[in-house]
Amino acid sequence: MEPSVLDTVGPVNAMMQAPVDGRSARWAQHREQRRAELLDVARRLIHAQGPDVTMEEIATASGTSKSIVYRYFTDKAQLQRALGRSILSTMHRRLVAELTALETGSGRRPEPAERIRAMIRAYVETAQRSPGVYRFVTRPSDGLNHFLESVSRLVTTFLPAEVPSPELWANGAVGFVERSVDRWMTQHETSTDDERPAPITSDALVDHLVTWLMKGMQA
């Protein structure tokens, strides 16, 4: 049932009567901006140096002290979650843009396989674009759990309506893709250390994952 006009009177009146503290608003805005700046420095540093970057190194690169960094991120786990949310936001924008372009270009809704391919490609390209940041975000921790749960929720919103038990399917698919991508990246990192065949390309990886998941969906 749609809310009536009367339902909104109370909240609107309360908002009109509540005093606005300009200083608090400005401070909150400044804090959020400073946090975003620190997160950007951390991302660039981890991208360049790998997932073992310390909070002290982030502070140095930011031109501040470690205690200041800890005011915005209480520990590495919180930084991990923040970077995960940032990555997820980027993946969401890419998915919306790609599926919208596909629908506009073809004049129809994307097929299930096309949606799955777009989601997997966005995930693989995210990992490939910055292995250090990806490794940092997906290290075993509460931060990893939070990231994978968030990815699963994102996948659920983009699944075709005919997929049965979409939440269960999304969670299983994300776990499958995450472990496959993790292994594929490890193969790339160690491919020059022995005489094993070169790892498959990212396009081949996406093709395989789409095929395997679509078969599971049709079973």
Image (tube, grey):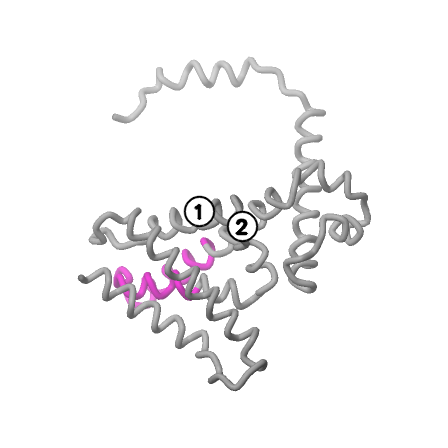
Position of residue 177 measured from the top left corner of the image (x, y, whole percent): 39, 61
- Name the disc covering residue 62, or none: none
Position of residue 45 measured from the top left corner of the image (x, y, whole percent): 70, 58
What residue is shown at x 23% (from left), y 66% (from top)? 215
Quarter where residue 35 is shown: top right
Mark 2–mark 1 CB contact (< 8 Å): yes
What residue is shown at x 66% (from left), y 31% (from top)? 28
Q: Secondary structure at mark 2?
A: helix
Compared to 13, does 214 lie above or below?
below
Three-letter amino acid code at the position of disc 2: Gly
Compared to 187, does 168 lie above or below?
above
**Residue tagged 2:** 84
Q: Secondary structure at mark 1?
A: helix
What residue is shown at x 47% (from left), y 70% (from top)? 184
- Other residues around mark 2 within 10 Å, as few (<14) / some (14–19) / many (≥20): many
Residue in front for this viewpoint, 168 or 62? 168
Residue 112 in magenta stretch: yes
Compared to 125, does 20 lie above or below?
above
Q: In the shown orientation, is residue 185 left or right of residue 175?
A: right
**Residue tagged 1:** 150
Question: Where does the magenta region start and end?
Answer: 92-121
Quadrant showing the N terminus = top left
The disc, 2 or 1, on the residue closer to the chain's N-terminal end is 2
Q: How many marks?
A: 2
Instruction: Judge whether residue 179 can be spotted in this image.
Output: yes
Residue that sits furthest to the front in the current view: 194
Q: Give the alpha-carbon distance from disc 2 to disc 1, as whole Å.
A: 9 Å
Three-letter amino acid code at the position of disc 1: Ser
Residue 209 in magenta stretch: no
